[in-house]
Amino acid sequence: MKYLIVIVSIFLLSCDMENPSKDLPLRVAERYGVDAFEHLNNINFTFNVKKGEKQVLRDWKWYPKSNLVIKYTENDTIEYKRSNISESNKKNDGQFINDSYWLLFPLHLKWDKGGYDYTVAENVRSPITDSLTTKLVIKYKSDQGYTPGDIYELFLDSDLRIVEWIYRPNGSKNGKGVVWEGEKDFNGVKIPLNHRNKDGSFKLWFENVEVN
């Protein structure tokens, strides 16, 4: 029996080595700390985006266990629960989904499992930095989320770190390609803080990140 267990283990390991794309989205989520996030109480962050001369800033606090979201504006503090979104908070929740997806997208590869299909291609050059990567394409199903049919083309290094991505809203052919930079570890959750396109005309970054 002991030898049989060893043989089975070697066989399973061999299968995984022959199929490195197996469960790749889940492995990326684990690499970014999805399991550590489950033990956290709250997360604060400031979302910044600059496109040309236009700049947007939004401050958030999120309690994942209760799904309480707090948005801080210059003149007000808005609180709501994502389990009970009023008509007046639909716009705020749309902004929160956008901002938190940029912040924690890799974790959604586990959270949204079953809501997307994926494909994998090895030895692909990333379009901006010309890095040799594994390309993981995530395609959300047509009935999922605020923007169904979204496609994310992720370019991964050998450590399963996202080097770049191309975001294609609603499956459009023309996507937004940006690099992922400035990764920091917050209590086991790895968050890239800076994103930019090739010519620097689009920049998106996070400040005041606290994970507790």
Image (spheres, helix red, strand yellow):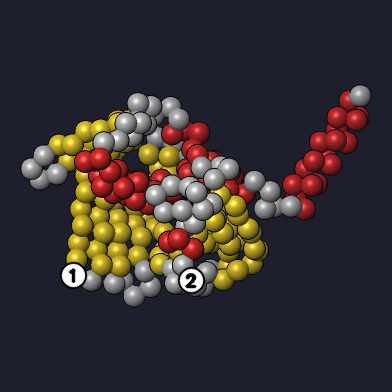
Instruction: Name the residue located 30 percent from the left edge and 59 percent from the top edge.
Output: 204
Q: Amino acid at mark 1?
A: Glu
Identify the image quadrant of residue 138. Answer: bottom right
x%, y% of residue 147?
41, 54
- Residue 90: quadrant of the picture: top left
Residue farthest bottom in this picture: 199
Label ID, residue 173: 2
**Quadrant location of the N terminus in the rendered image:** top right
Q: Is residue 45 visible?
A: no
Q: Determine whether the residue tagged by mark 2 lies in a helix, strand or loop.
A: loop
Residue 167, numbered label: none
Q: Nearer the viewer, residue 145 or 12?
A: 145
The residue positioned farthest toward the front in the image shown: 87
> Distance of mark 2 from mark 1, alpha carbons?
26 Å
Say few, some or many: other residues with alpha carbon within 10 Å of mark 1 (under 14 / 14 to 19 / 20 or more). Answer: few
Q: Secondary structure at mark 1?
A: loop
Q: Residue at x 24, y 63 (%)?
A: 50
Quarter placement of the C terminus: top left
Along the viewing direction, whichever of 210 and 204 lies nearer the viewer: 204
Q: Amino acid at mark 2?
A: Lys
